[in-house]
Structures are given as structure tokens and as C-alpha cells.
Amino acid sequence: MKSFSRRKFLQISSATFASAAALGTINHVTKGSKLFAGDKTKTGTYQVPTYCNLCFWKCGAIATVKDGKLWKIEGNPLDPLSNGRLCPRGTGGVGAYSDPTRLKSPLIRTGARGNESWKVVTWDEAFNYIADKLNTIKAKHGPEAVAYFSHGIGGNFIKHTFKAFGTPHIFAPSFAQCRGPREVGFELTFGDVIGSPERTDIKNTKCMALIGSHLGENMHNSQVQELSQAVENGASIIVVDPRFSIVAGKAKYYLPIKPGTDMALLLTWSNILIKEGLYDKEYSEKYGIGFEQFAAEVSQYTPEWAYTETGVEAKLIIESARELARYKPASFIHPGRHVTWYGNDAQRSRAIALLNALLGNWNHKGAFWQPTKMPIPPYPYPAYPEAVMPRADNPGKKYPWAGEEEGLTNGIREATITGNPYPIKSWVVYATNLMNALPNQQETLKAIQNLDLLVTIDVIPSEIAGYSDVVLPESTYLERYDDLHSSPFTTPFLGIRQPVIDSPDDQKPNWWIAKQLAGKLGLGHYFPWNDIEDYLKFRVDKAGLSYTELKEKGIILGAKKPVYIEEGVEEKFNTPSGKVEFYSTQLAEKGFDPIPKYEKPEEPPVGFMRLLFGRSPVHTFSMTQSNPILQDMIEENEVWINIDIAKQYGIKNGDYIKLKNQDGMVSNKVKVKATERIRTDCVFMTHGFGHQSKALFNTYQKGASDSHLVTKYKTDPIMGGTGMNINFVTIVREA
Ligand SMILES: Nc1nc2c(c(=O)[nH]1)N[C@H]1C(S)=C(S)[C@@H](COP(=O)(O)OP(=O)(O)OC[C@H]3O[C@@H](n4cnc5c(=O)[nH]c(N)nc54)[C@H](O)[C@@H]3O)O[C@H]1N2
Ligand SMILES: Nc1nc2c(c(=O)[nH]1)N[C@H]1C(S)=C(S)[C@@H](COP(=O)(O)OP(=O)(O)OC[C@H]3O[C@@H](n4cnc5c(=O)[nH]c(N)nc54)[C@H](O)[C@@H]3O)O[C@H]1N2
Ligand code: SF4
Ligand SMILES: [Mo]
């Protein structure tokens, strides 16, 4: 309670809620004012509309430059994602520019991998080195031996280079380490995915249940703004979390669930809705298939039984179920986002989808909307070469519902370690810190040892950069153009990212890197445009929109389309049966449970607690801890420990301890937050701290790294994602 950063943490969190409600009070650009897009020769003050890159939500933003200096970044009021307000991270974007740890020039490794010793080289030398190695690998092993990893829109152009190179191995951690199970669970049930931004109608809801999703710490801007609107409108919020999160403080019902037992709760809620006749009977009969089997299956899950599994009182389970039913169809169970928890995550997501089906809320106001998107024609590139070999990340389609677009990061790591089904010899890594994003760092290191070439393109010297053979410094988002942004949302829109200020050193934008590298690889014809603006203008023109207007405003809105199913219209579902699949024949055919079942989670060994983790409201993953502005707000993470457990160990708030996991892995020292706001069987810390890269000198070893302690993971048999909430830790007192 007394620690400085804890006080700040609470201030920030409540300020976020308060300010999200107070839209329009900030001093943003008034409509019609002239925006001098990209003009860096101007003295005085000018503004450039762009979109944020402090996380992958891509809020429309307006940067102000004063006498050649980057001054501030605010939300673009035209942008439907930000509504003119950025989250604290976005506002701290100025610090991405001034980060003292930034990579300045291309580097080639001189010492052993991981030693972080480098020689500075020119871009040409770096490209020659990379192209030479890639061509050798291609000649010997085929293009499939190269894997490209990226996260976020900035990876698009280099992705194009590697598709042209001929590899099918394109990866992002956002599937197998993040939201993959949710998309699979919903697709199997409704025939459609949730997508990003989530198609949740938080703004209009009357009742929403959050299963872990810690909105308010998870700062995805639009959702947090909508949440604060919902709270203001008096919506009932139900929070299910072993930890009393920030949003739990806004909840009507808080269910302090035993970690890993959510399936018991979800199936029991379903049973209550059916038994008490509170579900949408007409909807289930008309649109559902296998409802009878589902009802029979869940009838075994009683609230009294659920109490023994979840630790949540039967009365609370019943009341919260009734609350959800009371407001249907304007009530829903939020599908969550980071759902790779226990390895049965696709089934848990299916249980969430099925509960929503019982509420008859799919594509209904106050629950889920149907996405609309501004159609922007793609650039007419030559066709990519066909892959000769089948993918190596999911041999024999062992995981039938593994996504191909984002691939199985963990699967390709496995193939790199074993050489099966064939050798993988190079990783090219753009804007993802694989050392921290993937569970089990030792496995990642093992895979790296088998590579002939590891290239990282980053803005700062991340951990994965530290193990790379070549490191390429990218210009930050404030210094570059990027691909056009049109996400599926409630309003179709188009956004542009454009340079606000010059790069301070020898950093270059991703599109330039992609094009140069393609040239060196003999693939120059895949980049028929000369300059990024030719590319952007071409696509915007083709869409029948004005490039000049886009540059000036940053955002162009499309015509609104209906986002809810209209009253009386026959609903359609893109499942094999054309119905909402309470019973999944698809799953049954592949040998999986057609209806989700409860499995007991593994218990912690004596003296151990489950390691849980989540988001810091002012940081993004492991990418912002060195940002001076955000660091000033929160410099290190804390470990939440139940106050009674802390007493048993004789530790108090503000003490430093270490954590040791079930495999003997010991963390950095980390500050204790002894609190009643967490159960006794788990501890919690925010992800991304405890950096091991020495070159991140201003954040090196500050706080502890959850990634370091996540040595164990459980692979989801349906989609291949990595459940990571299955590690246990014990407390090691500092001497
Ligand atoms: N500030 C900030 N915001 C972000 C991000 C960021 O880096 N920084 N990243 C974004 C991204 S990509 C993602 S995926 C999201 C992730 O954010 P969310 O999807 O909202 O959250 P999770 O990581 O799933 O869950 C963390 C919460 O789940 C609780 N929890 C842990 N185990 C269990 C359990 O067994 N049962 C239940 N019911 N709860 C449990 C934890 O106590 C914690 O409150 O955040 C997004 N927003
Ligand atoms: N233990 C553990 N593992 C997790 C999670 C967790 O909570 N705990 N969360 C999971 C989730 S939900 C997700 S989505 C993933 C996220 O995983 P990642 O997307 O890998 O997230 P980061 O670790 O922040 O790595 C992002 C990297 O991009 C770099 N970067 C930032 N901006 C730019 C840019 O403009 N250009 C370039 N070239 N690089 C840039 C950053 O410096 C950083 O090194 O991690 C997953 N893994
Ligand atoms: S949610 Fe925050 S960090 Fe992410 S894009 Fe929006 S303003 Fe930037
Ligand atoms: Mo994520």
C-alpha cells in the first residue's frame, strides 16, 4: 500500500477510467485546422496525423512538432478506435523516439551468440551478408528452411519479401501464444471468429462477464473507453478472476475463482440457464444443433459441485447466471484475448461461445456486432512461388485447427530443434521478442543454436536481438510510413501512418528494408513501386479515395453499415450444419469432445503457488520498459502475494524476494505487493519486465520476468497453442 509505484499504479488506473469517460476535454486539433502532414521543414508548430504503434491496436493519433522537436502525441478525434484519446502508452509514444537504448546502425555479431558483441556495418554490408546466407540456405535446403516471424502491421512488407522468397513459414505470436484458441472456439460454434479489434459491443451492453480479461490494465483503447461508458450507463459487470483486478472494483459480482477451473463455472452457468429456463429457448431451437445433447451433458454440473472445484460460492454462481439471463440478448460473456492459459483453451473458448449462444446474442446489440471494413484493393504484385514442401510447424496437421496465417510459432521452434520434418536454418524476426513471447526460453535457445542465420529487425536491443547474427535498426513509427490501416470495426475507416520527424541515426523503415533485401535476393520485381508513397497512393486511388485528404486528416471514414442482425431477419451461420453447433461433429470426427468437458487442473506442489501474469497499464509486453516516459510511470513490476502467505513467510510490502519455479528456475529480485486482492494459491506479476539484454541498460534486470519462469507449457490438442498458466513458484527470501 505504501510503496511509491503502487500508489502511482492505482492513480493511473483510476485516472484512466475517469479520463476515458471525459472525452473531449483534451486539447486536440479542431476540425478544419490545416495539418501539415509530413512537412519537416516547417518552423513553429505543426501537426501530423498518423497512427500509434505503442501496441498493435493502431489508434489514430496526431503528433505535434514544435520548432523541429517532437512535442506531444494525442488521439485523432476522427478515428473511431481512439475517439480522440490515446491510452497512457500511446501518449508516451514520444518516449519511443527518445529512448536512449535505441538501435542506431546495422550490426553484425562478432562474439558468441548471446554475448552481445557487435561490429557496426553499413546497410549494404548487412544486406549482402543476409542475402548471401539466405541464398546458400535456399540452395541447400529450399526456401522452406527460412522462417519469418513478425507481430503487427509493420511486418507486412518484409512478409511480402519472404513470401516472394518462397517460404510458407510466416509466423506471429498472436495465434499460438494469444488469441488463437478463442478464434477456434468461436469459429467451431458460430462459424465465425471474434477478430481484432474484438467485435464486442461493450458500449451498449447491459451485462458483461469478464473471464480473466483485465480491461483497464489491458489498455486496448476502444474497449477501455467503452467499458467506462458501460459502467456509467449502469451496466452490470461480472468479473471472474483469482485476482481482484482494477475492473473487479467496478463489478456488481466478483467471483474469485480458483485458477484453471473456469470450465466448471462456464458449464455450470450453462446448466443453470437451461434448468431454470432462462436461456433463449426459441433461438436455441431455431438456430442450434445438438442442443439436447448439450443440455444432457451439462446437467451434471451443479452449483454445489462447482463450488468445490472453483471455490466460488454456489449462491454467487447462481445469482450471476441469472443476472446474465436477465439482460439477454444485451448481455454477454467476453471472449477474452490472451486465452492461452491451460492447454484446453479452445474448449474453454467454446464453452464461452456456447453460453453466449444460450443468451441468443450473436450479432445482437449489447453483445456482439458484425464487423464492417473499408475495402482497399491490394497492390497487384506478381504471384508468389508455390511451396514445394508441406509446412514444418504442424506436420501431418497434428493440430487440426492450427491457424496457417499466423502459424504455430512453437511448432516451427520444435522443427528447428529436431530437424523434423526437415531442417529449418534461418529465422528472420521483425517486432517480436521471441525470447519473451514464447514459453520455455531454453527451448528457444536450443532452436537458435541450430540456425545458420538469425536476423532481428527491431527499434531497441531486445533479448532476441542479443542472440542474433545480424541486427537491423528500424525507424520508429514516428519516423516512417507504414502500410494502410483498415481494421474490421463498427465503422469502416482507413488510417495512414506517416513520418512526423526524421530518424536520429542510421535507422530505416521496414518498407525500405523489405525492398532493399528483395533486391539483393534477386526478387526486385516483387517491388514494382519506387517509393512507399507510390504504393500507398496507388491503393488509396484504387479505392476511390483521396490520398491528399487521407494525409491531411489521417483518417477517412466510410459509410456506416448495419452492424447488428435486424429484427425478424433469418440468421445464418457459417458452420458445416449452418447452425450454432452445441454439438460439434467437426470435433467428434477428429476425436475431440464434441461438447466441452471439465478437467481438473493440476494442483501446485506443497509450498508452491500458481504463477499468473497479465498487463501493466502503462507498458506493452516487453517493448516499452526502456521508454523513458513510461518508465517514469512504472519502472519495475511487483509480485502480488496474498497477505496471509506473505505473513507466513515474514515478508511485507516493498520487500524484495525471488521466485523459484517447479523446474528450479530463479527470477530476478522483485518487489512484493502483499495484498488481500489475490487468492492464496497464486501469485501475479505483470509481463515484460526483468530484461536480460544488457544493452537495454536503463531497464536491465529491473523487476522479474514471467517469461523466465514459464518453463512449462501445455499444448492445446485442437489448435496447437501454448497454455502458459501451468507453472508454479515458491518464494526465495533475499539474503
Ligand atoms: N497495457 C497493456 N494492454 C494490453 C497489452 C499490453 O501489453 N499492455 N497487450 C494486449 C494484448 S496483445 C492482449 S492479448 C491483452 C491481454 O489481456 P487480457 O486478455 O485481458 O488478459 P489475460 O492475459 O488473458 O489475463 C490476465 C488476467 O487473467 C487473470 N487470470 C489468470 N488466470 C486465470 C484463470 O485461471 N481464470 C480466470 N478467470 N482468470 C485468470 C489474471 O489475474 C489477470 O487479471 O492485453 C492487450 N492490452
Ligand atoms: N510469459 C508470457 N509470454 C507471453 C505473454 C505473457 O503475458 N507472458 N503474452 C503473449 C501475448 S498475448 C502476445 S500478443 C505476445 C506478444 O509478443 P511480442 O509481440 O513478441 O511482444 P514483445 O515481447 O513486446 O516484442 C515486441 C518487439 O517488437 C519491438 N518493436 C516495437 N516497435 C517496433 C517497431 O516499430 N519496429 C520494429 N522492427 N520492432 C519494434 C520491440 O522492441 C520488441 O522487441 O506474447 C505472448 N507471450
Ligand atoms: S491502445 Fe494505446 S498503445 Fe495501443 S495503439 Fe491505442 S493508444 Fe497506442
Ligand atoms: Mo496478445
Image (tube, rainbow, N blue to C red):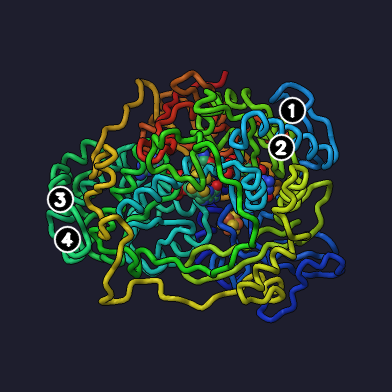
Residue designated by label 1:
116
| Of pointers 1 and 3, the one earlier in the residue sequence | 1
Rendered location of residue 335, percent (x, y): 37, 53
Q: Are marks 1 and 3 in contact (CB under 8 Å)?
A: no
Cα distance, mark 4 to mark 1?
61 Å
Q: Are marks 4 and 2 in contact (CB under 8 Å)?
A: no
User: Which callout, 4 or 3, points to the residue nearer the camera?
Assistant: 3
Please, what secondary structure does the residue beneath circle 2 have?
loop
Cα distance, mark 1 to mark 3?
58 Å
> Is residue 641 at all visible to an observer of this figure?
no
At a point 25% along the width and 45% down the height, the residue shown is: 265
Cα distance, mark 3 to mark 2?
54 Å
Cα distance, mark 1 to mark 2?
9 Å
Residue designated by label 4:
278
Residue 576 higher or lower than 392, as above or below: below
Q: Which mark is residue 461?
A: 2
Residue 646 higher or lower than 509, as above or below: above
